[in-house]
Image (cartoon, rainbow, N blue to C red):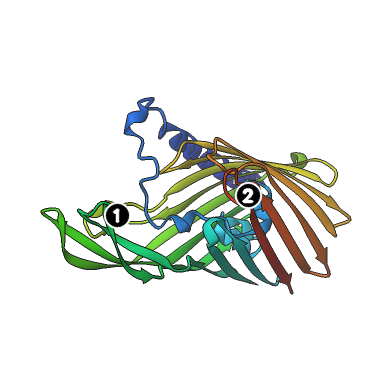
Amino acid sequence: MKKLHTFNIIPVLVLSFLCSFTFAQDDDEDTSTDKLAQTGMKFLSFSPDARAAALGDAFTAKTGGASSLFYNPAGMARLEGVNVVLGQTNWIAGITYNAVGFAYASDAGVFGVSMMNVDYGEIQGTIRSTNTAGYTDTDLFTPTASVVGLGYAFAPTDRFSVGGQVKFANENLGTAYLDADGGPSSTEDLDMSTTAFDFGLMYQMDWKNLMVAMSARNFSESLKYAEEAFELPLTFRMGVAADVIENLSVSLVNEHPRDYLPTTRVGVEYSLMNMLAIRAGFVTPTDEAGINLGVGFNMAGFSVDVAYTDFGAFDSVMRFGVQYTL
């Protein structure tokens, strides 16, 4: 019993160390060095799950099924059986995100597959010009983006969970026209593929079912489009979640993205007879995205989730999701 207790303390020490390391990234108060909005393949940090979005993406310390692969792979470690999740998001500017997740629990742990693709629609290409407009139209093109992930999670003790995922991402942004002496001299296809990695840890305590967790998403090498080098949207998150009163849980996440300011996310979820869930989330700081609201309906392992996000000057965003657990 003593050995088990000692082993359970190790994850807490690891989480504390990683938390300190993450916060240390922002010790430099010189914001002139911040690389805000300077990452590529930004779709890799998108939130496709309706339940998580309704909670303001304060989902790092929440357990789930295959949807955990999009936030913290350790969250699916205690899944029993098979879980399938489908999600669609009607994003701003007519962009659509579609996501699929599958998780299977075995004696050796939980194995999962995640997929997401982005439909940007048709875009009019342009190049710089010396005419009065300053540009010239080129062909219409259809950019594409997709990612497939293979994940694994397990729980070595009744309190500690760990998970990871390897992702294969591709993005095609059409054709780049490279300038020479003020005019286009050559072209280059902007079709890029890379491999990225996610991992996460979770530790559950007795008091109020308190869960402490961390995740790191989108570890990858630097890439280059035409003449511009970029990095993926690496993001560190530390989160806690607890059942503050019966049927009411609160989650909190501190996020440190590579390309934005440190962000705080808060989510509240109320469950009624395990059939109806009412959710709300808040994020700060943020540019346009405002309050997040959502509901979920569950019946015999089948659930439907809907989330609404106010997006300021843009149209509001709706996310829809269904999942089934066998």
Dividing the picture into quadrants, the one containing residue 144 is bottom left
At label 1, the amino acid type is Ser
Which residue shows up at 75% across the image and 65% down it?
A: 304
Residue at the limit of the structure toward the top, as seen here: 29
Q: Which residue lies under the disc numbered 1? A: 222
> In the image, is 216 to the left or to the right of 318?
left
List x then y, in percent, for residue 204.
Answer: 67, 46
> In the image, is 19 to the left or to the right of 326?
left
Residue at the limit of the structure toward the front, as seen here: 132
Depicted 241 relative to depicted 158: above or below: above
Depicted 309 relative to depicted 27: above or below: below
The earlier-in-sequence mark between 2 and 1 is 2
Q: Are marks 2 and 1 in contact (CB under 8 Å)?
A: no
Is residue 200 visible to us here?
yes
List x then y, in percent, for residue 266.
Answer: 65, 40
Q: Give the Cα separation between the discs numbered 2 and 1.
A: 27 Å
Judge the density around disc 1: few (<14), some (14-19), many (≥20) Cα neighbours within 10 Å.
few
Which residue shows up at 79% across the image and 69% down it?
A: 301
List x then y, in percent, for residue 68.
Answer: 60, 59
Which residue shows up at 52% across the image and 66% down it?
A: 151
At label 2, the amino acid type is Phe
Q: Nearer the viewer, residue 23 or 262?
A: 262
Q: Which residue lies under the disc numbered 2? A: 59
- Disc 1 on helix, strand or loop? loop
